[in-house]
Every structure is written in C-alpha cells, then in structure tokens.
Image: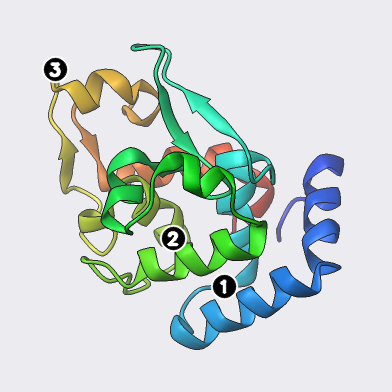
C-alpha cells in the first residue's frame, strides 16, 4: 500500500502553508541548502511537533515546564544554540521559523539524510539520525529515558534509533511508506 490519507486537520495545515508565499519561499531556501529533505516529511515533522501552530508550546508532563516551542518544537538548548530564546521563536512568523529550522539542520551535527523517518529522528536525537537501528540513544533509567517513554520498545528496554523510528512511523502512520 501507499501512504494513508492525512487527517483533515493535517490537510488543512498543509493547504495553509502551500498557499503562504512567505512560507513557500522559506521552504525553497531550506530545500536549496538541504536537498535531502522531502517536503512530505518536513510537513510531517511540523504536524507532529506543533500541529502547524507556530506559537505552540509543549508542556513537559514530568516537570510542568515548557519543553519546546514553535512549528518545529525548538527546545531551550536548541534555541540557545541558534542564538535565540524560546520567546523570540514564538514571536517569529512560520517562514522565519522555517529559516531557523534550516539553520538547525546545518548542525552540529549536520543533517545528512538517511531515508524515511530520519528528519523526525534528527529532531529527537540529532547525533543518532544516521546511526544503525540498534544504537542506544537513551539508556534505561536515564532522565531522557524517563522523559521520553513513548520512544521505548515494547520490552521497556533502552530507547534505540530503531525504537524511535518505529514510534515516529506509527505516530505519523498516515505518511508511512510500505
């Protein structure tokens, strides 16, 4: 089978951005810098991180703190590495956030592609996005393992590149490739 159809909300998000000339110009700049990024996966990342809301704020269920913001789910550390604060990101337009995401893909580490799911994986664990599926990303009992329970394999073992890809493929099954 091919791709399963996207939800109505997701289709509306894509249509909104497809008809936003500033956003499309930013997409073209990103694509020129990162030709390995596919538009469908880029939209999947945005939908998964924010539902297309450029002022989205993810609240950590463990700490109650704001964990990530904006279209692409920029964390405090990522924002700082890009010379921004989370508040500054929340004041950016969607197109400005796409340009910032393009800078994020420059690294370090630099996004190198790696097939379906690798862009989502890069957002979650940048240094592991090109590693083999059995690479341990978060050890059992670590803070990151506790904070990211959705990435755990069925046996509750360590979070690996493969278990993260499985979650991201299932979470976004409407884009899953056969």
Percent from the top left, x then y, of residue 32? Answer: 52, 88
- Measured in 3D between alpha carbons, the distance from the residue under mark 1 to the one under mark 3, in whole angstroms, is 35 Å
Q: Where's residue 104, x and y in %? A: 37, 63
Which residue occupies 58% across, 48% down?
A: 71
Give the structural element (helix, strand or loop) at label 2. helix
Q: Is mark 1 on a helix, strand or loop?
A: loop
SS for callout 3: loop
* Cα separation between marks 1 and 2: 9 Å
Q: Quadrant of the N terminus?
A: bottom right
Circle 1 residue? 38
Residue 91 lies left or right of residue 134; in this view the side is right
Q: What residue is pinned by disc 3?
A: 141
State the residue at coordinates (43%, 13%).
61
Locate residue 162, reporting x and y percent: 31, 46
Mark 3–mark 2 Cα distance, whole angstroms, equals: 26 Å
Sequence-wise first label, 1 or 3? 1
Residue at image x 42%, y 68%?
115
**Quadrant occupied by the C terminus:** bottom right
Left or right: 49, with 118 as reference point: right
Q: How many marks?
A: 3
Q: Is residue 175 left or right of residue 60?
A: right
Which quadrant of the structure image shows residue 26?
A: bottom right
Query: Could you tell me if residue 156 is visible in this image?
Result: no
Left or right: residue 148 compared with residue 61: left
Camera-side residue of 6 and 162: 6
Q: Observer-nearest residue: 166 or 41?
A: 41
**Position of 55 relative to 108 (above/below):** above
Q: Against 117, is 29 above or below?
A: below
* Marks 1 & 2, CB-CB < 8 Å contact: yes
Mark 2 = which residue?
119
> Mark 3 or 2 closer to N-term?
2
């Amino acid at each position: 089978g091919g791709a399963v159809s996207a939800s109505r909300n997701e289709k509306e998000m894509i249509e909104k951005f497809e008809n936003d000339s500033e956003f499309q110009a930013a997409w073209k700049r990103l694509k020129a810098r990162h030709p390995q990024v596919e538009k469908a996966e880029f939209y999947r990342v945005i939908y998964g991180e924010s539902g297309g809301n450029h002022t989205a704020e993810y609240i950590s269920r463990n700490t109650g703190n704001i964990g990530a913001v904006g279209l692409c789910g920029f964390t405090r550390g990522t924002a700082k590495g890009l010379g921004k604060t989370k508040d500054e990101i929340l004041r950016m337009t969607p197109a400005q956030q796409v340009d910032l995401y393009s800078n994020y893909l420059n690294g370090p580490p630099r996004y190198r592609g790696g097939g379906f799911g690798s862009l989502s994986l890069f957002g979650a664990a940048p240094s592991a996005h090109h590693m083999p599926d059995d690479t341990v990303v978060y050890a059992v009992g670590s803070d990151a393992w506790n904070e990211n329970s959705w990435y755990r394999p069925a046996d509750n073992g360590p979070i690996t590149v493969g278990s993260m890809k499985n979650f991201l493929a299932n979470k976004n099954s409407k884009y899953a490739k056969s």
